[in-house]
Amino acid sequence: GAVVSQHPSWVICKSGTSVKIECRSLDFQATTMFWYRQFPKQSLMLMATSNEGSKATYEQGVEKDKFLINHASLTLSTLTVTSAHPEDSSFYICSAREDRPETQYFGPGTRLLVL
Amino acid sequence: DAKTTQPPSMDCAEGRAANLPCNHSTISGNEYVYWYRQIHSQGPQYIIHGLKNNETNEMASLIITEDRKSSTLILPHATLRDTAVYYCIVRVGGSAGNMLTFGGGTRLMVKP
């Protein structure tokens, strides 16, 4: 199957700082990427849909000014958590959609801990 | 997208077949059945998907009932590394379909 990478795999930061997470499709082009968040013992929750060259679409309850998404190329989307607080500590996972066949592939996830 | 119902947990003996059921009684004609799994602390892994015919690949088989209201994922010879949460997701395929909505999934425990 297709490969999606994420960087960094884990990050610890101080409250108030910003953290950028990269998501790359390594062997295919993805016009659409998705960002999910997962809290312990819970299922994945979609945060936003990222479309190459246009603004991201955020799910209800997700602050677009806090979670900045940029999808500047067909292989890279970034999620920036601005002014991170302890409640933003979570497991962030991206996925990229391959069009033929139409399937989503997930990255390994980024574990964020805000102190 | 149609809602799915899965048992919260299942056990399976190593080397035996694991049969994971999924109910999707409100599925529409243009909705596909997708299966993903998530091993602890990793991103979800695509397993298989189908529309109405049974499907098989190197990882698993997908059996969809004729009325498409339920399906079964079969891992033919489960190993300890198959211990994971398995998600059954129903969604529209093609460009009309976008995000995947994850439910609670089934936590499969493969035991020696």
Image: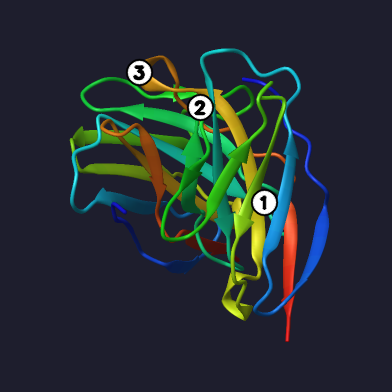
Tag in front: 2 or 3:
2
At mark 3, the secondary structure is helix
Residue shown at 20% from the left, 54% from the top = A26
Crowding at label 1, few (<14), some or many (≥20) Cα neighbours within 10 Å?
A: few
Tag in front: 2 or 1:
2
Q: Which residue is mark 3?
A: B95
Q: Which residue is mark 1?
A: A87
Q: Chain of mark 3?
A: B
Q: Earlier in the sequence, mark 2 or mark 3?
A: 2
The spot of residue A45 in percent (x, y) is 62, 39
The spot of residue B53 in percent (x, y) is 51, 31
Question: Between B61 and A92, which is closer to the camera in this rendering?
Answer: B61
Question: Between A109 and B55, which is closer to the camera in this rendering?
Answer: B55
Q: Which residue is mark 2?
A: B51
Q: Are marks 2 and 3 in contact (CB under 8 Å)?
A: no
Give the quadrant of the N terminus of chain B: top right
Q: Is residue A42 left or right of residue A105?
A: right
The spot of residue A44 in percent (x, y) is 62, 45
Tag in front: 1 or 3:
3
Q: Are marks 1 and 3 on the same chain?
A: no
Residue type (three-letter) at the residue carrying disc 3: Ser
At mark 1, the secondary structure is helix
At mark 2, the secondary structure is loop
The spot of residue B92 in percent (x, y) is 50, 20
State the residue lying farthest toward the bottom.
B112
Q: Are marks 2 and 1 in contact (CB under 8 Å)?
A: no
Residue shown at 73% from the left, 40% from the top = B22
Q: Chain of mark 2?
A: B
Q: Is residue A72 left or right of residue A43?
A: left
Residue type (three-letter) at the residue carrying disc 1: Glu
Q: Quadrant of residue A11?
A: bottom left
